[in-house]
Image (cartoon, rainbow, N blue to C red):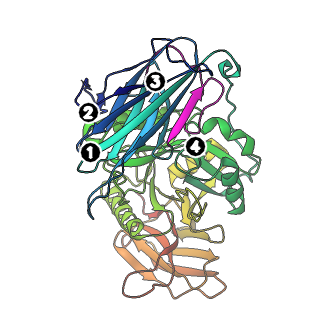
Amino acid sequence: MCEDDHAGIGRRAVFVTGAAAALTLGSVSFASAAGRNSRNQQTRTVRGTLPPGSPDFVYVPVEVPTGVREIKVAYTYDRPTVPAGTQGNALDIGLFDERGTDLGGRGFRGWSGGARTEFFVRADEATPGYIPGPVRAGVWNVALGPYTVAPRGLSYEITITLTYGDGDGDKAVRPVYPPERAKGRGRAWYRGDCHLHSVYSDGRYTLAEIAALARAAGLDFINSSEHNTHSAHAHWAEVAGDDLLILLGEEVTTRNGHVVALGTDPGTFVDWRYRARDNRFGRFARQIRRAGGLVVPAHPHATCIGCNWKFGFGEADAVEVWNGAYTPDDEVALADWDGMLVAAVRDGRDGRDGRGWLPAMGSSDSHRAPDVIGRPQTVVLADDLTREAIQEGIRAGRSYVAESAKVSLALTASGGRGEHAGIGERLRVDADSPVTVRLEVSGAPRCTVRFVTDQGVLFTGPPLPVSGSGVVEWRTTASYAAYVRAELRHEAAAGPLPGALAAFTNPVFLGRR
């Protein structure tokens, strides 16, 4: 085995300027045929140490000669014990081919973050998270992402193995993608989970397991949202069906927050190598929309490093207010979103002409058991079970979020001369005309209904019966409430705080604006 040591980040290093905040180390050369083993392979090992405050991304160039059919990378790094409250080491990894590492991802060949210790790429196949395709000659780059670095630094070792020769690995496979339509029920309420993970990023579920669990959860659609890779797109077709629409996307996992690209064109990759201070997010939000997708900031108040959303909501099409099991950060996200509704009313952006108000969503962010796929789920009123119709319903805010398929809501407002409006719509009545708000509930035993307006919670009903079904009505006017949305809460464990959500709706707006 030939070895090539990088004694430290500064040795033989060339800095690269730009939004990616990156560093490139001296290249690893395979120019000589010497050192091939009996399996026609060559191996090189590089070592180095990244200090605290390292750039977000470090690139190790690999000079790949002609005749290579497979590149394999394995890596390790030290995990020292650190004092309480101090970050230890965490090192992500990925790969870019000879087309380069420029922002935009033209040379992107895969990302596994910290989920894997090794991967391979060849023409016909690749490790989940990576993109199969020819291994062409040129300078490739192993991408390192020092997520956190301990005070004493992060020491790593990377082993790169090239396999030469002809064979099945030279035959590229044409990708097959799932259909954009499933057998729907016409205009109806469809249930979906738009944020979940499989073995194609840091999840443990296979695609077949996700599809089976989605069906068992009563879902009509799901969205593929692996961290920083579109590698799963070409593998969903075999588990799709008339009963399950599979949208394709990505969870774009930056150092300043995560965003779900929802329902993009097959094979769309969205780069993540920037922070809010780089002023690059708008470029990639527009790329998501050009690819037919929606821009959905995920878990905006999550407490994990890099998870809290810092890009603002001017480019968003919806926001993931409820993520997984209901926790305090979801409660903060709900309150923050409600504040955005009030601002939309104040600024006259509550008519859905232009960008308008920002609808809320909920998704499971499921990775592995005991994560529950479909808890929560977004329930969308759509013209049919198609990619376009589901996206249009989400964008328009014709949706509510429920903890499971057992829970169903129907929120309407009526008044004036027989006018009616539902979730995401406007009831056009005079300011002082009486308005009746009505919520029908099923599947929520002992839960409590709350009606929330731009003034706050103006009505709280008694607990629903053990049957979980009931009808609650409240009367108001457009001058008193600019909008009304419904919350369904579980019984509170103790104290003055409300219980966890069982469901909540997007608003119905009141008045003639």
Q: Residues within 10 Å of mark 2 (few under 14, many from 20)?
A: some
Residue placed under numbered mark 4 in the picture: 200
Residues at marks 3 and 1, CA–CA distance in whole angstroms: 31 Å
The magenta segment: 117-140
Q: Is residue 328 magenta?
A: no
Residue placed under numbered mark 3 in the picture: 106
| Quadrant in which residue 52 is drawn | top left
Q: Indicate the amino acid at tag 1.
A: Gly
Q: Are marks 1 and 4 in contact (CB under 8 Å)?
A: no
Q: Is residue 136 magenta?
A: yes
Q: Residue at x 43, y 42 (%)?
A: 76
Residues at marks 1 and 2, CA–CA distance in whole angstroms: 10 Å
Q: Residues within 10 Å of mark 1 (few under 14, many from 20)?
A: many
Residue placed under numbered mark 2 in the picture: 9
Q: Are marks 3 and 4 in contact (CB under 8 Å)?
A: no
Q: Earlier in the sequence, mark 2 or mark 3?
A: 2
Label disc, if present, on residue 153 of the rendered structure: 1
Q: Residues within 10 Å of mark 3 (few under 14, many from 20)?
A: some
Residues at marks 1 and 4, CA–CA distance in whole angstroms: 29 Å
- Closer to us: mark 3 or mark 1? 1
Work out whether 455 lies above or below 276: below
Label disc, if present, on residue 78 of the rendered structure: none
Residues at marks 4 and 2, CA–CA distance in whole angstroms: 30 Å
- Closer to us: mark 1 or mark 4? 1
Q: Earlier in the sequence, mark 1 or mark 2?
A: 2
Work out whether 130 lies above or below 62: below
Give the left or right position of residue 49, taking residue 114 as reference: left
- Closer to us: mark 3 or mark 4? 4
Inspect this view and state whether residue 130 appears.
Answer: no
